[in-house]
Image (cartoon, helix red, strand yellow):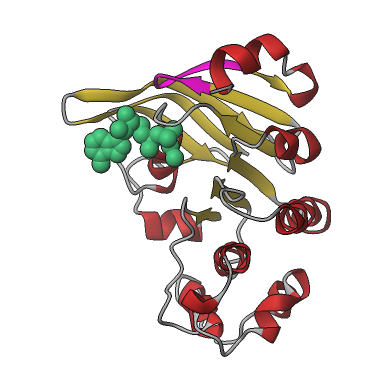
Amino acid sequence: MLNVQDLSFSYGEVQVLRGIDVHVPAETIVSVMGRNGVGKTTLMNNIIGLLKPSSGSIQIEDRELVGVSTHRRIRAGLAYVPQGRMIFPKLSVEENLRVGLSARDDKKTQIPDDIYELFPILKEMGKRMGGDLSGGQQQQLAIGRALVTDPKVLILDEPTEGIQPNIIQQIGAVLRKLVEAQQMTILIVEQYLDFVREFCQQFYIMNRGEIVAHGETDSLSQGMIQEYLSV
Ligand SMILES: Nc1ncnc2c1ncn2[C@@H]1O[C@H](COP(=O)(O)OP(=O)(O)O)[C@@H](O)[C@H]1O
Ligand SMILES: [Mg+2]
């Protein structure tokens, strides 16, 4: 569904991604793990088109995305929940969701009901300012906003960072539901191993800009964890 092939990227002279291959099959949840600073966010920003790779290919359903604007990638079916959530603190919850609507092809002005079914809290809190929500609620809002464009592939960068365990579970359950009920495909940067084990079918581990391990989550070994993940 989403295929990244031999992707490289440099910030100026500093090469941060080296020949990355990541394949995300349709209707699966795939994790990207690795310590801080190894290039996970840089990879996601290349996939969504905020950064331009020096070489390599990014395809969604065999359609090449390198050279295509972020806006058009969203129309092609990608959606992004950036690290740190990046909701608008001075806009209401409802207004934050409407920002997502503006990226749609059609002239739809109603926030789809299924967003509120997935996250009832967003309905309850509709008139509240984004900045007044708890961290977990803001993360739910960020995911809701990404879903407003009705994506085929959802990309999330560390959605559980700094969030209470009960909301982490809710987020995981929503992602699973998106795959099962809406045939979504999900790529998730995640450092929280319990979450990966519970919700992700496959993993990739990055180290210094390279993929150093990947496989079924069941095959994630203690050796890999020690070498590439534990701090
Ligand atoms: N805007 C930037 N300019 C230069 N270097 C950057 C920039 N953003 C990140 N980096 C560097 O690129 C590397 C990868 O960062 P990042 O992709 O954010 O890692 P991760 O998400 O895995 O923590 C780090 O060494 C970081 O310092
Ligand atoms: Mg990051």
State the residue at coordinates (80%, 38%).
198
Magenta region: 206-213
199 or 110, which is in the foreground?
Answer: 199
Q: In the image shown, does 187 or 127 lie closer to the viewer?
A: 127
Q: Where is residue 208 in the image (x, y as percent from the top left)?
A: 40, 19
Q: Nearer the viewer, residue 94 or 6?
A: 94
Q: Residue furthest left?
A: 13
Q: In this view, does 164 lie to the left or right of 96?
A: right
Q: Position of residue 66 (x, y in %)?
A: 37, 40
Q: Is the magenta stretch mostly helix, strand or loop?
A: strand
* Image quadrant in which you'd find residue 122: bottom right
Residue at 74 percent across and 36 percent down: it is: 194
Work out which quarter of the rendered image holds the N terminus and state it.
Answer: top right
Seen in the image, is 31 located left or right of residue 114? left
Rendered location of residue 228, percent (x, y): 55, 17
Q: Which of 229 and 61 is in front in this view?
A: 229
| Residue closest to the far top | 223
- The answer to whether one can see residue 43 in this image is no
In which quarter of the view is residue 37 placed? top left
Percent position of residue 117, x then y: 78, 75
User: Is 36 on the left-hand or right-hand side of 25?
Assistant: left
Which residue occupies 55% across, 45% down?
158
Q: Is residue 34 covered in magenta? A: no
